[in-house]
Amino acid sequence: MIKNIIFVLLSLISCTSNTDNKQVSNEEIVMSPTYSPEENYFEITRKAFAGDTIAYKEIRKYYSETTSGDFLYWSLIMSNKYNYSQAHLDVFYSITGDYIGGNLDRFYEIDSQTQKLAISFLNKAVKANVKEAIDIKNELKITRRKAK
């Protein structure tokens, strides 16, 4: 989120320093290359906050190309407020991503509180019948048996 604010501020500064004093619209300043020209980041986040799953997928795409840390906020909103099944799994990935880097064998190296939090969202995704979550849950069971 801070990166976005800095980007907007830098864009505003560079736009006001143009010699031709051309007026720049909000959409041009905050536009991400992954969004259509008709919509800007603020509009898409507003829609996602209202439960729009298409807008959420756009935000997901944006953060997959940058950093996952800021994406946790959006996945929590969609998971908790709207019970969106893909968001449950996204929360799991956001929580565990920096710890294990996609390596499920390292999941049990995470502290127990973080494990419980991640598992609670994984279980929500399993309950929603998200195939990838079911596969992860099964893999974690196998990893757990190997560790014992």
Image (cartoon, rainbow, N blue to C red):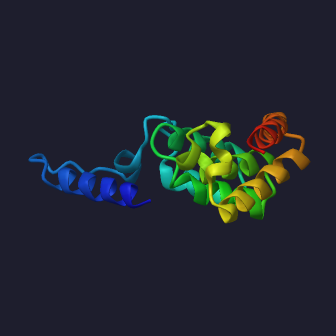
For the residue pair 98 and 29, the one nearer the viewer reads as 98
Say which quarter of the image contains residue 137: top right
For the residue pair 114 and 73, the one nearer the viewer reads as 114
Q: Residue furthest left?
A: 19
Say which quarter of the image contains residue 116: bottom right
Total marks in image = 0
Position of residue 45 in the picture relative to residue 31 (left or right) = right
Say above or below: 129 vs 26: above
Say above or below: 126 vs 114: above
For the residue pair 125 and 3, the one nearer the viewer reads as 125
For the residue pair 37 and 72, the one nearer the viewer reads as 72
Q: Residue furthest front?
A: 148
Seen at 58% across and 43% down, the residue is 100
The quadrant in which the C terminus is found is top right
Position of residue 66 in the picture relative to residue 106 (left or right) = left
Q: Position of residue 109 (x, y in %)?
A: 62, 50
Q: Position of residue 104 (x, y in %)?
A: 67, 38
Q: Position of residue 39 (x, y in %)?
A: 52, 45
Seen at 15% across and 51% down, the residue is 21
Position of residue 91 in the picture relative to residue 5 (left or right) = right
Q: Is residue 60 visible?
A: yes
Seen at 12% across and 53% down, the residue is 17
Q: Is residue 50 visible?
A: no
Q: Position of residue 51 (x, y in %)?
A: 73, 56
Position of residue 126 in the picture relative to residue 91 (left or right) = right
Seen at 69% across and 62% down, the residue is 112
The quadrant in which the N terminus is found is bottom left
